[in-house]
Image (cartoon, helix red, strand yellow):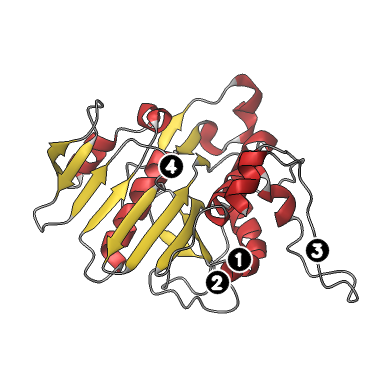
Amino acid sequence: MFDDLIQHRDPPPNRVGSCTDGREQHLTEGAVQLAFAMHLLRTVPGLFAVSVHPDGEHLKHFDFRAWLEARGFAQTTSIGTTACGGTYTAADGRTVTVNPKSGLGDVVARMGDAVYVAECRGGVINSRHAGQLSRLRRGLCEVVGLLLASPNEKGRRQFAVVPRTLTTETLAARMAHRAGEAGIEIALVDGRGNVTGVPVAGPSDSAILRGNEDFPRTRKNESPVSPTGPSFSYASHLRGWCRLQDSNPCPLITKQVFLVPARPKDVARLS
């Protein structure tokens, strides 16, 4: 697969002893977006066009243009004012459009009546630092929450895509059933761009995410799970919801409710 998705960076002083090999391995959100975009082009029969929508911060941390050109995609058109914005075309006719515009979904592909939408987050994949583990967990909860707040049109496939570590594997396995009931599939991307689907119950029935049904565990040196405290920012409302995914301790209780502070625009999006 790809050997240039990870960025190796020196950790700050407070995290020096928390990462393997003395350097942090950053799988940025831009890298996750491109890895999943390429995954769709490989696995969806007949799909030849996919769009990614990074924001300005993503463009600072990952060179979309250089990465796509290294994969044989030449820039054929320009979009917006950024150097990397535009359409990139491969020799076989496949295209990747980089449109630096928020609110459209991080990765979007359309083919006939089918629509594939992914929300992505990145993170440090080799750190045991509590703050970095918390960020990985929060990222998964945020993307599921964003998809829950999006309109679910007919033919729409929704994917929550985050880096693959033991932390995200464990949380994803606990969230998969309820996310699946809402039409959301969870996908994990490793440092080489391999995408693993998280089965809801038994082998995954998604052709896009099939191929890793046994869902192997992460190696020993990957990050353990770390609990995180509550946060009431909109994007992480679901962190409280994910604490309800375990089996109900009381068989007489059939409903679980998570309460968060409401803002008018949040209510409008979720209603």
Residue depicted at 62% across the width and 55% down the height: 271
Tell me if label 3 and label 4 are in contact, CB under 8 Å. no
Q: Residues within 10 Å of mark 3 (few under 14, many from 20)?
A: few
- Which residue corresponds to mark 3? 256
Q: Nearer the viewer, residue 161 or 163?
A: 161
Could you tell me how far apart the alpha carbons at marks 2 and 1 are, in whole angstroms?
7 Å
Tell me if label 2 and label 1 are in contact, CB under 8 Å. yes
- Residue 176 badge: 1
Q: Which type of secondary structure does the marked residue at label 1 adopt?
A: helix
Q: Position of residue 209 (x, y in %)?
A: 42, 68
Could you tell me how far apart the alpha carbons at marks 1 and 4 are, in whole angstroms?
24 Å
Position of 63 compared to 243: left or right?
left
Q: Position of residue 223 (x, y in %)?
A: 62, 47
Q: Give the number of callouts.
A: 4
Mark 2 or mark 4, whichever is nearer to me: 4
Tell me if label 2 and label 3 are in contact, CB under 8 Å. no
At label 4, the amino acid type is Gly
Could you tell me how far apart the alpha carbons at marks 3 and 1 are, in whole angstroms?
17 Å
Q: Residue furthest top?
A: 13
Mark before the other along the chain sequence, 3 or 4: 4
